[in-house]
Image: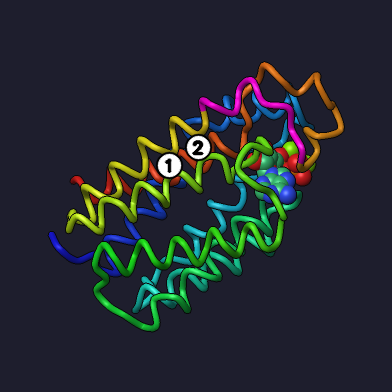
Amino acid sequence: AASVTTGDLVAWIRAFRDAVQQHKDELTRLDSEIGDADHGSNMARGLDAVVAKLDPEPSTPTDLFKTVGMTLVSTVGGASGPLYGTLFLRMGPALAEADPVDAAALGAALRAGVEGVIARGKAEVGDKTMIDALSPALEAWDSAARDDASPAAASRAAAEAAARGRDATEPLVARKGRASYLGERSAGHLDPGAASATLLLEALSDTLAA
Ligand code: ADP
Ligand code: MG
Ligand code: MG
């Protein structure tokens, strides 16, 4: 389809929750290597709280993202809660009540969200954070949308770029967050937040392809 409905976006958030549940132990294991071993449980707890708020279904994409963002900020401790919360809180207003949304509008909302994460966390590409997955995903989305790709195709390109960005965090030395306390010893491990951010984009791609 050329446009994405509130129902599609609700399905995305549910699929993200399911993916995080499925990969919870893996996310926590990654965080045990360079952090404090709570990223899987932080995200799973937050997304369970989010899904509990999706019945009854929010009526617009803007309402949905507001609910998701506020719930993540208030239920996820640590760095990732406020950062993922900000991502969604910025996406909602960027859609300016559009319903349904097309590939360009959803890409612009993602851009507003990622810019919010960068403004809040001050991470750049190469700092070994979720930005290493999110930022290339955005570039891929925009480039697909400029070529008139469908939302499904744009999200597939974004998910593939996110996965490459996640994999590229392995050799990096962390410069933000807890992992940065390890200095050089943070090299040789994937960043957990880049892994969960890849799940977010893969969940969107899987939802829109279905
Ligand atoms: P905490 O580190 O507080 O325990 P989590 O384990 O839930 O929080 O999340 C850790 C992830 O948060 C990291 O893997 C990284 O991707 C992300 N992160 C940490 N600090 C920043 C930051 N300043 N900007 C962007 N992402 C960050
Ligand atoms: Mg942690
Ligand atoms: Mg923690």
Name the image colouring.
rainbow
Instruction: Identify the element where label 2 is drawn.
Output: helix
Magenta-colored span: 167-175
**Quadrant in which the N terminus appears:** bottom left
Query: In the displayed image of the protein, which residue is found farthest to the left?
Result: 1
Q: Residues within 10 Å of mark 2 (few under 14, many from 20)?
A: some
Residue at coordinates 33% horizontally, 61% vertically from top-left?
A: 9
Identity of the amino acid at label 1? Asp
- Closer to the camera in the image, 65 or 112: 112
Residue at coordinates 62% horizontally, 33% vertically from top-left?
A: 192
User: In the image, residue 110 lies at what x, y percent?
Assistant: 44, 61
Instruction: Identify the element where label 1 is drawn.
Output: helix
Q: Ligand 2 is in which quadrant of the figure?
A: top right
User: In the image, residue 47 lies at what x, y percent?
Assistant: 54, 52
> From what the image shows, is residue 10 above or below residue 179?
below
Q: Label for residue 18?
A: 1
Residue at coordinates 44% horizontally, 46% vertically from top-left?
A: 200
Residue 18 on the magenta span? no
The answer to the question of whether label 2 and label 1 lie on touching residues, with beta carbons closer than 8 A, is: yes
Q: Residue 145 vs residue 15: left or right?
A: left
What residue is shown with label 2? 21
